[in-house]
Image: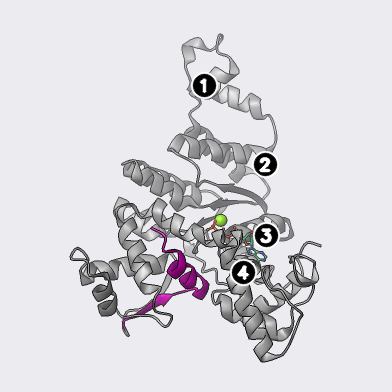
Amino acid sequence: MPLNFDTSPYGRRSETDYIFSRFDAGKNLLMPGPRRLGKTFVLERLEQRASQHDYHAIRLDVSSCADTQAFFKKLAEKIEDKLGNKILKQIKQRALQLGAPHQQNSQTLPQALLNVDWESYAGNLLKELAEDSRRWLILMDELPIFLLRLHERSAIDQASRVMYWLRENCLNLSIRWLFTGSIGFEPLARKGNYQGAIRDLEGFDLKPLEKNIAQIFVQDLAQNGLLPYRREITDSESCAIVDAVGWLSPYYLEAFSRHLQGVPTNAQAETQSLIEAARLSLFQSADKDCFSVWSEHIRKHYQDNTAKASKLLAALSEFPNGASSGTLLADLADPNMQDTELKRLLAILEEDGFIICDFEADTHRFRMELLRLWWQRYLPE
Ligand SMILES: Nc1ncnc2c1ncn2[C@@H]1O[C@H](COP(=O)(O)OP(=O)(O)OP(=O)(O)O)[C@@H](O)[C@H]1O
Ligand SMILES: [Mg+2]
């Protein structure tokens, strides 16, 4: 039986209620958050619950857009899906207006589509939405990944143009917006000099689950028949799972719980050995790939810093309770890595959710114990 997100405490109801209340107050939001935290899940719930708050939602993921044309096209098509009327006719009309005017009569629809000015077209559709009597939301997943693609292609000016385009279309119209990102906006905006474009967005800090809610989550997974070996997880076991996972994203709680075997117990010693066995089983199974999104994230998005970040994490993975920058520098023994550069890299890794840094106390450690153990074992490059 699937989980019921409408009534369960892990269904992110208080988060979505809060977000709708900020939309009601006229705010547009930015929801950054590390990989696998549950950002897309929250967008799905917002979309599903929009009508209860008298909104109509349009949700799109722009991480795969390779250029600005693809971005505006995706936005336009998603709006059209929802507006649901006269779609092809409108595209054709628009294409004929904006495309090659001399060939109007001979142009076929596919040819016309190639000539569409998607930016103006998306802008027009947004105006149509804004004039609609209904209240509209646009939930845009992974905007900074798209911006980073533009940065990588030396098209930083285009990233800036898109952001200022969005700013105009966010602020001047009655539509409400929410953007998510698994990489930080701020470093990109700083590099591309478009901080002004995100200045008026209000931050919303999505958190992992609270401990008691995470316990209910894993117990519900068992009771709903969603785990291969268990129909029950005891209080003592759920508590130990939560401790073992450390960073309470539902994704990792579920991955861990899938490996809990044996007879349910509340006895302390038995619980500990079952948890230890579950951890081993997780690392030996195909499920261990659930951690590879983190190394992939570094490979894809860290450009020249990829090797340095991987080595730094490898060094840090030896310290369950964290390490100082001095210890890390000594371990890395890299003449190209000075204290300032190390600190800059630590800050980026913290921003992306890999680690927690205390720069005052100079102690830095993995945010998620399971990821530390995985990194230590597999040493991804
Ligand atoms: N509150 C929740 N209850 C149950 N399942 C959840 C919850 N939050 C997330 N999940 C599940 O965890 C998985 C990862 O969540 P999601 O895709 O939303 O994370 P994300 O932050 O968007 O990750 P990424 O940065 O990789 O895109 C999904 O399968 C999702 O359904
Ligand atoms: Mg996502």
Q: Which x, y percent locates residue 47? A: 67, 54
Q: Quadrant of the N terminus?
A: bottom right
97 lies left or right of 131: left
Between residues 115 and 372, which one lies in front from this camera angle?
A: 372
State which image quarter holds ligand 2. bottom right
Mark 4 is surrounded, within 10 Å at the Cα level, by few (under 14), some (14 to 19) or many (20 or more) other residues, namely: some
- Describe the element under mark 3 as helix, strand or loop: helix
Q: Kindly check if marks 3 and 4 are in contact, taking CB atoms under 8 A apart as contact.
A: no
Confirm whether residue 338 shows in the render: yes
Residue type at mark 2 is Lys
Q: Three-letter amino acid code at disc 4?
A: Ser
Q: Is residue 247 left or right of residue 188?
A: right
Marks 1 and 2, how far apart in space? Answer: 23 Å
- When the figure is inspected, residue 75 is found, relative to residue 240, above or below; the finding is above
Q: Nearer the viewer, mark 2 or mark 4?
A: 4
Q: Which amino acid, by three-letter code, is at mark 1?
A: Gln
For mark 2, what is the residue? 82
Residue receiving disc 3: 45
Identify the mark at residue 281; answer none if there is no mark.
Answer: 4
Span of residues in magenta: 362-381
Q: Secondary structure at mark 4?
A: helix
Sequence-first tag of 1 and 4:
1
Between label 1 and label 2, give the one nearer the viewer. Answer: 2
Examine the rendered structure and indicate whether residue 231 appears above or below residue 47: below
Name the residue at 59% across, 18% down.
109
Mark 2 / mark 4, whichever is N-terminal: 2
In the image, is residue 77 above or below residue 353?
above
State which mark lies toward you, 1 or 4: 4
Q: Was residue 345 drawn as part of the magenta stretch in this picture?
A: no
Instruction: Kindly give the residue lying farthest to the left in the view shown.
Output: 335
Ligand 1 contact, mark 3 (Cβ < 8 Å): no
Q: Which mark is residue 97?
A: 1
